[in-house]
Amino acid sequence: MCEAAAYVLRNGQEELLLSAVDIIEPEGDSLRLVNIFGEQKVIKADFLRLNLVNHKIILMEK
Amino acid sequence: MCEAAAYVLRNGQEELLLSAVDIIEPEGDSLRLVNIFGEQKVIKADFLRLNLVNHKIILMEK
């Protein structure tokens, strides 16, 4: 499977927001993340970097 | 490998922008995409949807 882990960069640290992320969609000024288990997170954040081969998504809160 | 294909939505059609995408980073008001072969594309676009399990990234030009 090719899902990725989504992290939020806070104070220079990468904090895990949601693992096994499948879908990410903008929703207003937020991002909605859904993982392969159906768990959802909505966060006011922007993409900082996607690294798909390493299964890693870094977000930064607005 | 877990790279994805990036498409741009134009006139309701998904046009392939770059295949085998590994990295995506914002660069000013654009996105910089790099694939596993080192090919790069820079496009003034926003994310419309990421579907990682289906290896698909949909962008929309600004």
Image (tube, coloured by chain):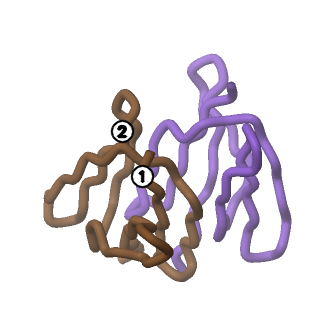
Chain colours: A purple, B brown
Left or right: B8 in relation to A48? left
Looking at the picture, tell me which residue is in the foreground, A45 or B47: B47
Q: Residue furthest top?
A: A11
Q: Is residue B22 visible?
A: yes
Pointer 1 indicates a residue of which chain? B
Left or right: B11 in relation to B19? right
Quadrant for the N terminus of chain A, please.
bottom right
Q: Position of residue A55 (x, y in %)?
A: 49, 61
SS state under label 2? strand
Seen at 84% across and 60% down, the residue is A40
The numbered disc on residue B44 is none
Circle 1 packing at 10 Å, graded few (<14), some (14-19), many (20+), is few
Residue denoted by label 2: B30
Seen at 40% across and 32% down, the residue is B29
> How far apart are the two marked residues, 2 and 1, measured between alpha carbons?
9 Å
Pointer 2 indicates a residue of which chain? B
Tell us which disc is closer to us: 2 or 1. 1
Seen at 83% across and 73% down, the residue is A38
Q: Position of residue B38 (x, y in %)?
A: 14, 57
Which kind of residue does numbered mark 2 sit on? Ser
Quadrant for the C terminus of chain A, please.
top right
Seen at 50% across and 75% down, the residue is B12
Q: Position of residue B18 (x, y in %)?
A: 26, 67
Looking at the picture, tell me which residue is in the foreground, B3 or B14: B14
Residue denoted by label 1: B61
Q: Is residue B3 visible?
A: no
Which kind of residue does numbered mark 1 sit on? Glu
Left or right: B8 in relation to A38? left
Res B14 → quadrant: bottom left
